[in-house]
Image (tube, coloured by chain):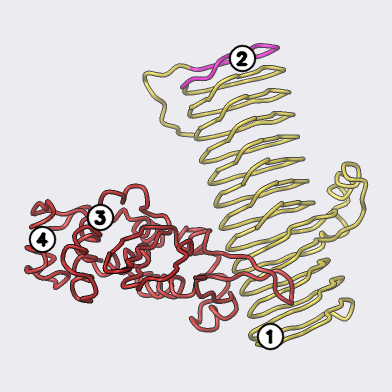
């Protein structure tokens, strides 16, 4: 499935940002080089972006840019947060996850009182899958396990988590975004890991 | 200049037709037809003549003149390159001052870039303040907050993006630069060739481009533009041609 694309022109119009800002954020690595997609159009070569991801990203940048320097912000988007660890208590107090979800998570996975930003991503994804109710608890557990086991390899790359159920069998797939070609089988979840991680991290800030 | 030197490092000095391996030093000075065949990490790097560095150079200051050649990447806080300097890899330098004929085989990334003469960058170029007086060829994108180019000779940059972009024809009086570029490139065409220029404020002279996009655009003299898309204002000098003017 080809991702929805938005042209540079439409993007600027929609978000109200200027060329100067867009190019500056590109220099600061706040918008990854890979998101600048060149395609031929009737006016020649034009630049497009993955629509949902770029809009999310620009939203976050606009929200944060007055409080945080662009260089700090760039660090956060690469998954390395300025504050390395958080306590579970803090997460529960701030309503980022509920104690119930934390306890369920602990049934299947190890978790210390202090968690890293990666672990917060796992917890948040666990939370989300439980909330959405499309997967049963076993499916959620092995999906999260697959994510944790492979996270080092896919972190900061553009990967999607897709969950399909076919003939009663559930399968979790981690693949580069746009590379998953599906035949029959019902797609129960499709989550872009980078987008999800950004939302989680920006909530933490 | 106050540089912090390391107490556990020495200096490296080669001249004539000397050779050395790489290593970590405080001061490195290479002159003549000397060669360094290894990576260098140092505080002050100085070279002249036909010096050749076969590895990467990581330094605080990179000060070279003559026909120096680095086969790897150069990483510096500050660099001053005079003469016919070549870097086959990437050049990462916060502050750069280039004079003469200069070539980078990879990308040139910095904060302040000041080029006088003829420069050729095969890859992309990024800066906050990009100043160039002479002739310049860039293979990819010039992405800089401020761009200020005084053209003296044929220049080519496929894509320029930034906030404030100014391209002017070097005043006729600067015959010196025109003479260099004429001698080097056998051309007396003063012109910048671009595919796309996108910015907030754009001022152009002597530019041939396919598409210009900006908020406030001024097309000065001797330009040939296929299409201008502007948000706020556009003015076009009578000596220039703009085929399509589109207000967004």
Relative to the observer, which residue lies in front, A164 or B227? Answer: A164
How many angstroms separate mark 1 from mark 3 (CA)? 48 Å
| Closer to the eye: label 4 or 2 | 4
Q: Quadrant of the C terminus of chain A?
A: bottom left
Residue, disc 3: A118
Residue B84 is covered by the magenta coloring? no
Magenta stretch bounds: B11-24
Position of residue A190 in the picture relative to residue A100 (left or right): right
In the displayed orientation, state which residue is furthest to the bottom.
Answer: B247
Q: Which chain is painted in yellow?
A: B
Please, which chain is the residue tagged with disc 2 on?
A: B
Relative to the observer, which residue lies in front, B46 or B197? Answer: B197
Q: Earlier in the sequence, mark 3 or mark 4?
A: 4
Q: Which chain is painted in red?
A: A
Label placed on residue B14: 2
Position of residue B163 in the picture relative to residue A69 (left or right): right
Position of residue B52 in the picture relative to residue A184 (left or right): right
Residue, disc 4: A88
Mark 1 nearby-residue class (10 Å; few <14, some 14–19, many ≥20): few
Identify the secondary structure beneath mark 1.
strand
Residue, disc 1: B233
- Tell me which residue sits at (12%, 60%) in the image: A105
Asked if marks 2 and 3 fall on the same chain, the answer is: no
Disc 3 vs disc 4: Cβ atoms closer than 8 Å? no
């Amino acid at each position: 499935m080809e991702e929805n694309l938005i042209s540079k022109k439409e993007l600027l119009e929609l978000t109200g940002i200027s060329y100067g800002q867009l190019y500056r954020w590109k220099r600061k690595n706040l918008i990854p080089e890979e998101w600048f997609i060149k395609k031929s159009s009737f006016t020649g070569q034009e630049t497009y972006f993955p629509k949902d991801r770029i809009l999310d990203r620009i939203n976050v940048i606009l929200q944060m840019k007055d409080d945080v320097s662009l260089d700090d912000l760039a660090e956060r988007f690469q998954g390395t947060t300025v504050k390395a660890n958080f306590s579970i208590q803090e997460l529960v107090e701030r309503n980022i996850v509920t104690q119930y979800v934390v306890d369920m998570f602990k049934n299947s996975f190890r978790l210390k009182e202090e968690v890293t930003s990666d672990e917060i991503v796992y917890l948040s994804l666990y939370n989300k899958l439980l909330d959405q109710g499309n997967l049963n608890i076993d499916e959620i557990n092995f999906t999260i396990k697959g994510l944790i086991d492979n996270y080092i390899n896919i972190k900061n790359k553009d990967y999607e988590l897709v969950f399909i159920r076919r003939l009663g069998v559930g399968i979790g797939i981690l693949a580069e975004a746009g590379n998953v070609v599906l035949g029959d089988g019902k797609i129960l979840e499709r989550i872009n890991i980078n987008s999800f991680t950004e939302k989680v991290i920006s909530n933490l800030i | 200049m106050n540089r912090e030197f390391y107490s556990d490092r020495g200096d490296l000095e080669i001249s004539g037709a000397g050779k050395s391996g790489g290593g970590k030093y405080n001061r490195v000075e290479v002159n003549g037809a000397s060669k360094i065949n290894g990576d260098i990490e140092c505080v002050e790097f100085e070279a002249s003549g036909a010096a050749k560095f076969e590895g990467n150079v990581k330094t605080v200051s990179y000060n070279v003149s003559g026909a120096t050649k680095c086969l790897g990447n150069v990483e510096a806080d500050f660099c001053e390159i005079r003469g016919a300097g070549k870097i086959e890899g990437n050049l990462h330098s916060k502050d750069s001052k280039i004079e003469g004929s200069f070539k980078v085989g990879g990308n040139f990334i910095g904060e302040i870039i000041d080029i006088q003469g003829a420069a050729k960058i095969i890859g992309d170029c990024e800066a906050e303040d990009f100043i160039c007086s002479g002739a310049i060829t860039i293979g990819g994108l010039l992405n800089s907050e401020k761009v200020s180019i005084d053209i003296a000779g044929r220049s080519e940059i496929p894509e320029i993006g930034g906030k404030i972009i100014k391209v002017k024809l070097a005043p006729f009086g600067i015959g010196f630069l025109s003479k260099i570029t004429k001698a080097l490139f056998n051309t007396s065409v003063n012109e910048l060739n671009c595919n796309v220029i996108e910015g907030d404020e754009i001022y152009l002279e002597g530019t041939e481009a396919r598409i210009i996009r900006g908020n406030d655009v001024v097309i000065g003299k001797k330009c040939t533009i296929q299409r201008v898309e502007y948000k706020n204002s556009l003015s076009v000098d009578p000596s220039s041609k703009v085929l399509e003017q589109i207000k967004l």
